[in-house]
Image (spheres, rainbow, N blue to C red):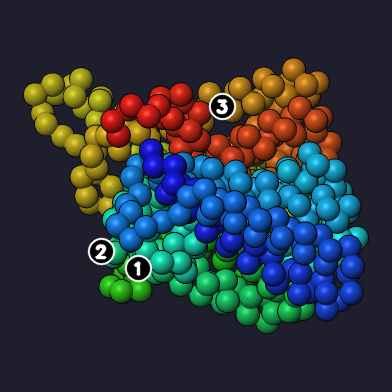
Amino acid sequence: MNRRIVAGLLGYLTLFCGAAMIPPFILAAAAKEFNGAAAFLLSIFLCLATTFELERFGGLKGKDNVGIREGIAVTGLGWLLISILGLVPYFAGGYLNLLDSLVESVSGFSGTGATVIEDVEILPRSILLWRSLSNWVGGLGIVVIFMAIMPQFGRGAMFILKAETTGPTKERQMPRIRDNAKALFSIYVLLTTLCAVGYFLCGLQPFAAINHAMTTIATGGYGIFNGTVSEYGNAYLEYCMAFFMIISSGSFAMYVVAYRRGVGIIFRNAEFRTYLLIVLAVTLIVACDLIWEMHVAPETATRAAVFHVASLSSTTGFVAQDFDTYPPISKAFLLMTMFLGGCAGSTAGGLKVARIILLFKFVALIVRQKIHPNVISSVTLSGRVVDIDVVYGAAKFFFAVVVLDILFAAVMMFDGIDFVNAISVSVSTMASVGPGFGIEGATSTYALLPSLSKFCACGFMFLSRLEIFTVLALMSPSFWHKSRNW
């Protein structure tokens, strides 16, 4: 691995992180938030100092190409480094202790949206903006946004894009990597703008509309009120939010192709159609359950079901009411949607619908082969044959998620949390949802978790955002071995 290239690219990333802190700093200075302004100024200085040291050690030359190990290292170490730098405003401003600052930063950048702040309404606007920005930057991907606005990395840059993009399939829509990243970023900005305008038309003030738009399209779920959406009690806003959360659960690569070839691409996408069917089915089940078990009025039940199914299936985690009080059947289906998540290539977390489709089709294929051993068949998705390595990859990822869910739950039970709450927190964290049921339910925060569980939650959110194997590769001793031929 060429450490000089890795250090050079990490230097650019830390510079990008410092640039992202400029808007909150300007807001803090304009509003005379002296603690906030000083904290962001210190954060920007640390980003610049880190950039200087990394560039002094490394740097890029004209013919440099990023290989697979460099791509994994830049992605994994970049996320880790920016998460550490991102905690400085919380800690230096005196808003959180060091551990809680780390949790808030990792949760923001990973798009989990879990907070340890019990009263966000006492925070200055600059910190609220930084929380939303961290969600937004992390949603599409720190490295993807960076690639869209910075010079070309070289022919090997595809390894970086693959390391950060979520889902079993990572297709390129344009020949050049940077053009691909720019197209994704353009769609991301466009949807964020449309979302902010929609929220403004629904009655939100500009600051609230912009903040909620960023965290909606990023499916992060950070809000500027303790009750997030429940503070507004606005039916139009909830339906608008549900629409954009569902849109954000679709593949952004699919939207790029749809822009070039027509919207019919969206409706022919098997994964997105399946996701919409799951959302519709679970919405009907939850609405009927609320009407039957809790005697809720049909319109109110439908509104609650539409919003919360969209919120949890997209792994955004916005809350319009305390869904922890729902009947067991509703909670079971909501937990299932949290685990499944959105589509591959979206900002949503979870297992991804594409993997579920591939695994079901793979099981059906095995059954057919048992019945008809001589028949040659394959797994398809959206009418295209899927390479068997991709199918095996989906199975490996499913296994890894289940094992890590169990491991994290075991750690929390060791830390004093009961079984049910441990399972709920584990699924919610690994799916990048944030709120769940029980100890970190709709009206609770991660502030209730013991210190060991908080620290481990940071690691599991980090693993989840980079879809496990990128981080595990970094932890492998052979990855750093100089004599290995990669």
- Which amino acid type is shown beneath numbered disc 2? Pro
Q: Nearer the viewer, residue 150 or 226?
A: 150
Q: Nearer the viewer, residue 384 or 115?
A: 115
Position of the C terminus, as image quadrant, is: top left
Residue 247 horizontal/vertical position (percent):
50, 63
Q: What amino acid is labelled 1 in the image?
A: Asp
Identify the element where label 1 is drawn: helix
CA distance for labels 1 and 2: 8 Å
What residue appears at the point 11 percent right and 31 percent down from the top-left corner? 376
Q: Which mark is residue 175?
A: 2
Name the secondary structure under disc 3: helix
Check if mark 3's residue and mark 2's residue have beta carbons within 8 Å: no
Left or right position of 255 against 283: left
The amino acid beneath tag 3 is Leu
Please tell me which residue lies in front, 485 or 53.
53
Q: Give x and y (percent) for residue 389.
A: 27, 34
Left-right relation of 68 to 421: left
Q: Residue at x 68, y 35 (%)?
A: 457
Residue 184 visible (yes or no): no
Mark 1 and mark 2 in contact? Answer it, CB < 8 Å: yes
| Residue 436, visible in the rendered structure | yes
User: How many numbered marks are there?
Assistant: 3
Q: Residues within 10 Å of mark 1 (few under 14, many from 20)?
A: some
Residue 404 numbered tag: 3
Q: CA distance from mark 3 to mark 2?
A: 36 Å
80 relative to 256, above or below: above
Tell me which label, 1 or 3, sits earlier in the chain: 1
Question: Residue beneath label 1, please?
Answer: 179
Which circle, 3 or 2, is nearer the viewer? 2
Disc 1 to disc 3, how far (Cα)? 35 Å
**Percent from the top left, x then y, of residue 367?**
25, 24
